[in-house]
Every structure is written in structure tokens, then in C-alpha cells.
Image (cartoon, rainbow, N blue to C red):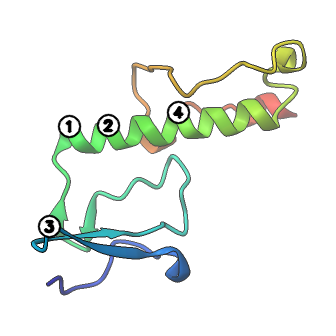
């Protein structure tokens, strides 16, 4: 089916596959590193590259996931979460340059 080296590592116990309609094999892999700045450019090294639009959409999704985690974990960054526990980035849209995981807010956490 596929031959080659994965672009990066995955969590072996989290991978699954299913056969759908007796003609489609769906493979789900869980990446070891799901940081927003670690968006795979292809499934295998130098093969099955995502087109630029798909790559952009994947980067957006990972960046929004990162913002969601940071909103839940960083009281300094989003101090009003205690007054607004329903604050949620899951339906948010972002624009701009979020290559390598988007803006770096780590300096604000000090």
C-alpha cells in the first residue's frame, strides 16, 4: 500500500485503520508532536505532500488548538477566564501569518 518513512514519529498504540465499503482503507495516525509549529508537509518523507491550501488549513487548525490549550492553562495570558469559563476558541477563525505555529506569546507568561 504505502512504502517509505513517515514524515515524523507517531504514537504506535493510538494508530487505527478501518476498511470502508470494502474498497477504502482509512488510516488514522496520532502524531507524537502535535505542537502548532510541527505541521507535517507530507505523509511520508518527500512523498504525498499536502498542497499549499491544505497545508495552510492544517496550520490554522493546529494554531487554534494551541490557542485553546494556552487559554485554558495560562491565567496570566487570559486572566479573565475565571470570570468567563465558557471562553472557547473552537469556533474561532484567524488570519495572518501563523507559519511555525503562529505568534509566540511565551514572553507574556513571565
Picture layout, residue 34 above or below residue 2 = above
- Secondary structure found at label 4: helix
Asked which quadrant contains residue 73, the reply is top right
Q: Which residue position is annotated with label 3?
A: 21
Quadrant into which the N terminus falls: bottom left
Q: Which residue position is annotated with label 2?
A: 57
Residue 54 screen position, x and y as percent = 23, 42
Residue 69 screen position, x and y as percent = 68, 39
Q: Is residue 15 left or right of residue 56?
A: right
Q: Is residue 80 left or right of residue 62?
A: right
- Secondary structure found at label 3: loop
Tags 1 and 2 touching, CB below 8 Å: yes
Label 2 Cα crowd, 10 Å radius (few <14 / some 14-19 / many 20+): few
Q: Mark 4 and mark 1: span between their CA atoms? A: 17 Å
Q: Mark 3 and mark 2: span between their CA atoms? A: 28 Å
The residue at 44%/20% (across/down) is: 93
Earlier-in-chain disc, 3 versus 2: 3
Q: Which residue position is annotated with label 1?
A: 53
Picture layout, residue 11 above or below residue 31 = below
Earlier-in-chain disc, 4 versus 1: 1
Q: Mark 4 and mark 3: span between their CA atoms? A: 33 Å
Q: Mark 2 and mark 4: span between their CA atoms? A: 11 Å
Tags 3 and 2 touching, CB below 8 Å: no
Earlier-in-chain disc, 2 versus 4: 2
Q: Which residue position is annotated with label 4?
A: 64
Amino acid at each position: 500500500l504505502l512504502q517509505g518513512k513517515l514524515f515524523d514519529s507517531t504514537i504506535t498504540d493510538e494508530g487505527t485503520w478501518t476498511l470502508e465499503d470494502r474498497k477504502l482503507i482509512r488510516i488514522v495516525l496520532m502524531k507524537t508532536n502535535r505542537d502548532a509549529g510541527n505541521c507535517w508537509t507530507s505523509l511520508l518523507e518527500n512523498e504525498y505532500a499536502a498542497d499549499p491550501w491544505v497545508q495552510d488549513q492544517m496550520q490554522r487548525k493546529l494554531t487554534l488548538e494551541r490557542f485553546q490549550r494556552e487559554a485554558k492553562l495560562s491565567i496570566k495570558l487570559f486572566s479573565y477566564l475565571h470570570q468567563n469559563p465558557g471562553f472557547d476558541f473552537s469556533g474561532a477563525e484567524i488570519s495572518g501569518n501563523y507559519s511555525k505555529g503562529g505568534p509566540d506569546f511565551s514572553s507574556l507568561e513571565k
